[in-house]
Image (cartoon, rainbow, N blue to C red):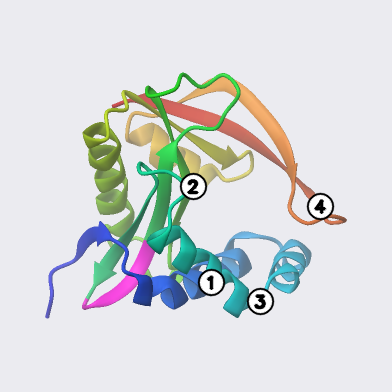
Amino acid sequence: MIADSVRLALPAEAPAIAAIQRRAWSANFDQATAADLLSSVDLATMTESWTAAITRPPLAQFRILVAVSDDRVVGFAALGPSDDPDAEAGVDALVAEFTIDPPAQRRGHGSRLLNACIDTLRADGFTRATWWVRSTDDIVRRFLTEAGWDADGAHTEVAMTDDGPHLKLLRLHTAI
């Protein structure tokens, strides 16, 4: 039995990452939104995208981390430089994706993964991190504020699919 841990993702883990992301969509969104998301992209295409992100990241500081339990991927995070218009290059980082497999939640994997994200971003020279959170996601917002993150007043609205619903997002930030 391998101890629970977090490390850089391996290319062979892309299918597990894609499957976790799809399960999280089903668990975290209302039925109509989840159906729209799931029908907008298939598992094979998602796997290809994650494989590319792991093997050919767009920037050297772009990382995919995985939380592992008993030799099985139970969560993942994608992080790197912030692409927000008000971001300061070399200073501001972004946690772009962060997902713990719904059946593996509430077992410490999220805290381990969050700590590894901050350690990785700090090692890459960033001093601030940002994270866009759905305005209705009280659980993630509470998780982050309890870890020292705070809203910075920025907000946006994004379309999940071309003709689907829009999500309101709030940005949280922390010094790292």
State which tag comes first along the sequence, 4 or 1: 1
Element type where label 2 sits in the image: helix
Q: Are marks 3 and 2 in contact (CB under 8 Å)?
A: no
Real-space Cα distance between discs 4 and 1? 25 Å
Q: Nearer the viewer, mark 3 or mark 2?
A: 3
The span picked out in magenta is: 70-75
Question: Would you say residue 23 is visible in this rendering?
Answer: no
Q: What amino acid is labelled 3 in the image? A: Asp
Up-down relation of residue 165 to residue 120 (above or below) = below
Q: Which mark is residue 139?
A: 2
Up-down relation of residue 135 to residue 172 (above or below) = below
- To which quarter of the image does residue 10 belong? bottom left
Q: Which mark is residue 165?
A: 4
Q: Nearer the viewer, mark 4 or mark 3?
A: 3
Q: Which residue position holds label 3?
A: 42
Q: What amino acid is labelled 4 in the image? A: Pro
Image coords of residue 130 (percent x, y): 46, 31
Q: What amino acid is labelled 1 in the image? A: Glu
The quadrant in which the C terminus is found is top left
State which tag comes first along the sequence, 3 or 1: 3
Q: Are marks 4 and 3 in contact (CB under 8 Å)?
A: no
Q: Which residue position holds label 1?
A: 48
State which tag comes first along the sequence, 3 or 2: 3
Q: Residues within 10 Å of mark 3 (few under 14, many from 20)?
A: few
**Residue that appears at 60% across and 64% down:** 25
Q: What amino acid is labelled 2 in the image? A: Ile
Q: Residues within 10 Å of mark 2 (few under 14, many from 20)?
A: few
Element type where label 1 sits in the image: helix
Q: Nearer the viewer, mark 3 or mark 1?
A: 1
**Residue that appears at 42% across and 43% down:** 59
Real-space Cα distance between discs 4 and 3? 19 Å
Real-space Cα distance between discs 1 and 2? 30 Å
